Amino acid sequence: MNVITIIKNAYQALRQNMRRSILTMIGIVIGIASVITILSLGRGFEAYTIKNLTASNEKNVAVNINYSPTDYEQFSTNKMRYFSDEDLRVVRDIEGVEKVDYVKSDDDFLTVELQVAAKKITRHLGFVKFDKERVVIGRSITPEENETHQRVAIISRETAKDINANQDRVLGTGIEIKGELYQIVGIYESGSSGLFDMNPDVKIPKKSYQYYTNNEGNPTQIKITVASDYKPSKIAQKVIKKLETVGVSRNFGDYSTFDMSSLTDGIGKVLKMLTYFISAIAGISLFIAGVGVMNMMYTSVSERTQEIGVRRSVGARRRDIRNQFLAEGLMLTISAGVIGYIIGYLIALLVSAFLPFKVSPDLFTISLTLIITIVIGLVFSITPANMAARKDLVEILR
């Protein structure tokens, strides 16, 4: 019996018991739809999170390399550059580096090493937006202080806690940024305008930063876009070693990096585990639906005993009978899987319309649906199919 004949016979058998077939399919449709909805939303949320954390996408992570001069006065007096075009050319030639650019202060977001009392901490530095700061302790920075290059700063509540458990004592103390001492005049709520948006930990007047660090047209950071399949932390270390060897300012300061990749890797793993765990719970319904498929197949075998006998008497082999019932089980589960995938994706698409990220069909979820439905069809149909194939022709015709 050829494959086309088996498929036609399977379709006719399922169509003869349409109501029972539909009721059996409903369980698989619900299970697949639940898993696909959760997976699609989970993967969309993961991509959105990584993109916000890296200002890139999951395949091309951006890493910043910072330069901290040991003598700021020397750079200001001699108009020396922290990074040169030759530095960028050398970095660009390193395997795993897809792109490299200067990070200018106009980006309004930098990663710097701060000196607080006797310890150094790495924090995100931003510039004051005078009409948007939510200062809760102390005061904000005024436009006049920006114009006159005053060294004042406001810090987030979280950074204040790192400095002193008693936040009121933080006001009036100093924080060293790029060799300059800034007085802390206020503490603000960092807040968030979106899921995992990166907010500055310290804010200072932009013109003060440019004036005291000679940073206007002389960036202290470069941004490296890491090629896919390369580990960002390893590429960052390669770049630092190279710059320490041939960098234009290698003898007058230190190179460092804030390894965002370790943070994104950790968050990505947690999100994946959470998504798969919830999907596994939803997948329990697929097991129950599989039991329903097995029950339907047993019923079908019992009802079609005479049909099996007639087919055996005209030359059908045991293998043909087994393949016939397996084909019916697979056709049932695969059809339900396709319907479940479409419904699950549409639900995810609808839900994502109210969320800050989008979902899209991908090869992983499509392949997963196909594999699950085939496995359910085979596992829960094989026993009834074997039972049909083993029926004794003499017993059937008595």
Image (cartoon, grey):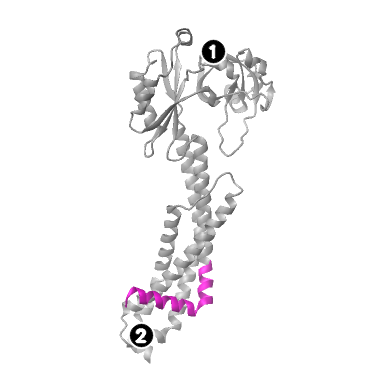
Mark found first going from the N terminus, 1 or 2: 1
In-image side of 64 versus 183 (left or right)? left
Range of magenta residues: 1-26
Q: Is residue 181 above or below residue 364?
A: above
Q: Is the magenta stretch mostly helix, strand or loop?
A: helix
Quadrant, the C terminus: bottom left
Q: Where is residue 282 in the image (x, y as percent from the top left)?
A: 52, 57
Q: How far apart are marks 1 and 2 (CA)?
A: 93 Å
* Residue shown at the point (55%, 17%) measured from the top left: 209
In this view, the residue in front, 189 or 203, is 203
**Three-letter amino acid code at the position of disc 1:** Tyr
Q: Quadrant of residue 306?
A: bottom left
In-image side of 330 versus 1 (left or right)? right
Q: Where is residue 389 in the image (x, y as percent from the top left)?
A: 35, 79
Question: Callout 2: 10 Å neighbours few (<14), some, many (20+)?
Answer: some
In-image side of 385 versus 197 (left or right)? left
Total of numbered circles in the picture? 2
